[in-house]
Image: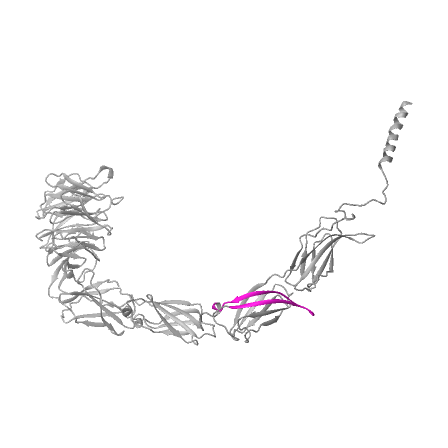
Amino acid sequence: MKRQIYIILPLLIFYISLYSGCTSPTADFERSNINDPFSGNFETGKVDGIQISITIDGSIDIIWTPSESEIDYYIVEKALGDSISFEEIGKVPADSTLFIDNELRVRGKTFYRVSSYLQQESSEDILIEENQASLVFHEFGNFTTEFLDSEQTLRVNFSAGHPLFTHFRIRSDNNITGNLGESILIESGSSENYFIDKLADVKFSPRVYQVEAYIKGDDFEDFVFSIPFTFNPLTTFSPTNFVVNPLNEVDYLLEWDDKAFFIDGYRLIRTVEGYEEEILLPPDISSYMDSILVDFDSLGLNRSTVRNYRIESIAGNTTSSPETSSAFMFIVPPVFIDSFLEFETSSGIQLEWAFNNEQEEGSLAKGFFLERARITDFNRGEFQKIAILDPDLRGYLDTDLNEDESYVYRIRTLVSGYRTEGIQYGFGKVFVKDQEINSSSNQEVSIIEVSPDGSYMAVIQGSEHLNQSIEIYDLSSMQLHSTISLPEDDIISHLKISPDGSSIYFSVPYRKEIWRADFPSGNNEEVVIHNTMFDENENLTMGIRSIDVSSDESYIVGLGGRGHIIKYDLNSGERVWDYKNYTTPSIVIGPNPAISPDDKFVAGSSRELFKLNFDDGSWVEDYQGHFNIFRHTGFSVNSRYLFTSRYRGSSFIYDLESSETYNFHPGPTTPHPFSENIMLTGHFLRDLDENRIIAWLLGFEGWIYSSAFISEDIIVVGLESHIEIWESDQSIKWRSFGKTYVGD
């Protein structure tokens, strides 16, 4: 019984609860959620992201962002003109966000509206969202121009990007139609359009156009916008392809292209060596022959074979862009003919010249410019014009001469500034080659020393690391008299004959010794200086390499290492002083040291030349600006001049009284042992006090490695593989002494 009561009680509670929680709707019930389409206060949303674009064929794409609300479809509407009155143009399902308007019906102001709806069966569909946007006509461009040469008009092309515009109007402050102030109207029916400018008032100033776009219907004409465009006539009508063709030294043919039909003429500007000249030309030409002969001398200009031209067109007060061109007229200058035959006439100097290629080079010359300089100083003096000659001449007799002078001539064509060589003549002593002495070593003759009485000479052949002997020649017979060599073929790097001619000293660098022997026999060889090593920390394998002996034969000076000069006492063999000039990071083979004849100074070099006090080795002076590996160093007999020469290069002479420096090419320089002021520089003998050449080696060819004087009339020179003896010939009067580079 109790179990039945327990079952009935829960069921009863359930029925009571159900009845009390559920009530039926009444007539007063309202929906109040603003997001509920069925509520009385529902607010319509917006269609987001509407974008409108025009395609190239004129159709209009309208796209938008999908709705996040529950909808069934979209309605697309369009409104034209100022009065916005929308009309439906399409319906789009809910799963699409694109509508394409293919009507090609627009105005300057065109609007599109997109609305979303929820469909109802028994009542009107509910508007869920809507929004609108206007059609934007983007500015167009892609302007190009084309000059129509046959019509002398300009076609201007442009692209609107679509065919929706019906026509364009082009306005300009320039005269584009033939009537100033008149505009151009062109119809449009595609995306590509053009108009014609008749260029009625064209000059070289820019032409500015305003291209106005319109849309026109039966009862309206809407202006959309205006696009500016500028045409610069400089880009089309300036001269082009400007070329200069030199026909010869004087005549230059200029040619160019030009489309400009409206110009008043041309301005041609020629520039040579900074000198500018203007030439006005008529408008109806496209070439010009410039045959002007530039007077370099009166203008004070350097001569040049380069002409620079600039041409520009002139139209009213405007000019085109300049076009430039240049031409280089190189003519190999004529060469002097010099056979070295005797020229014994004293009436004058006969000069002759020729071109290497008469047909190709000689025909280009318009004349010759002959110059001469008197050799009265170390720099050959200033060249002066002596004649301007016709182009068919190949010779000239110069009679305005002075027997106390030597001369150098140079010649060029009338315009060219190129002078590759000159020729030199003089009135005085000439040395001619008498004989050659060949040795078995066939090496360069690096050192020649003649005894004070001129009876013997000592010779070293070969570079510093190949000298294994000294050859002594009897100069009366020109035969080998004796030879000095050391055991085990030790290297002999330098020698010096004593002032009295009784001894010969020589350096043996790998033994670090200085030796002496009798002269000229070469007997009684002995070591006089036993240790010519430098500081131990220099770690050098060689000792003294070159030497000089004082005038009283009491001292010997040696050079080596990295700028060491050491003075030794020949009686004791001890060092007196050691001068160190560390100017180079490694060993440099410098020239010989030189003791001045008055025993006051010592000169040495380790790339730079310097002078020391002979007594104590203190520094006196150095000579900057001539850094090189020098080959020879020495003093003149009177100790006034200090000289040095570079290997196969220039010679430098320093006047120790006036502090002047003279440079000669080529070297080397050797002092004359019989006179205080005579030196051999290259193959010329120079009087240093009078600053002039007094003699020369006639017809000499090659490089002088060493030289010495046997007497005032006999010179010995060492060449690359042999020795030559040159003797003076007093019978020759005016005489060529060779070609030389003379520069500009």
Say which residue appears at 84% left-offset and 44% top-offset.
28
Q: Quadrant of the C terminus?
A: bottom left
50 horizontally vs 640: left or right: right
Q: Within the magenta stretch, is there residue 334?
A: no
Q: Quadrant of residue 529?
A: top left
Q: Position of residue 636 (x, y in %)?
A: 13, 53
Q: Position of residue 548 (x, y in %)?
A: 14, 46
Give the residues drawn in magenta, as a range.
Answer: 207-234
Q: Nearer the viewer, residue 277 or 634?
A: 277
Tag count: 0
Can the viewer see residue 337? no
Q: Position of residue 681 (x, y in %)?
A: 18, 57
Residue situated furthest front in the rendering:
28
Say which residue appears at 56% left-offset and 64% top-offset.
142
Q: Quadrant of residue 215?
A: bottom right
- Magenta span dominant secondary structure: strand
Q: Position of residue 381 (x, y in %)?
A: 20, 63
Q: Nearer the viewer, residue 510 or 547?
A: 547
Q: Nearer the viewer, residue 635 or 115?
A: 115
Q: Nearer the viewer, residue 498 or 77?
A: 77
Can the viewer see residue 603? yes
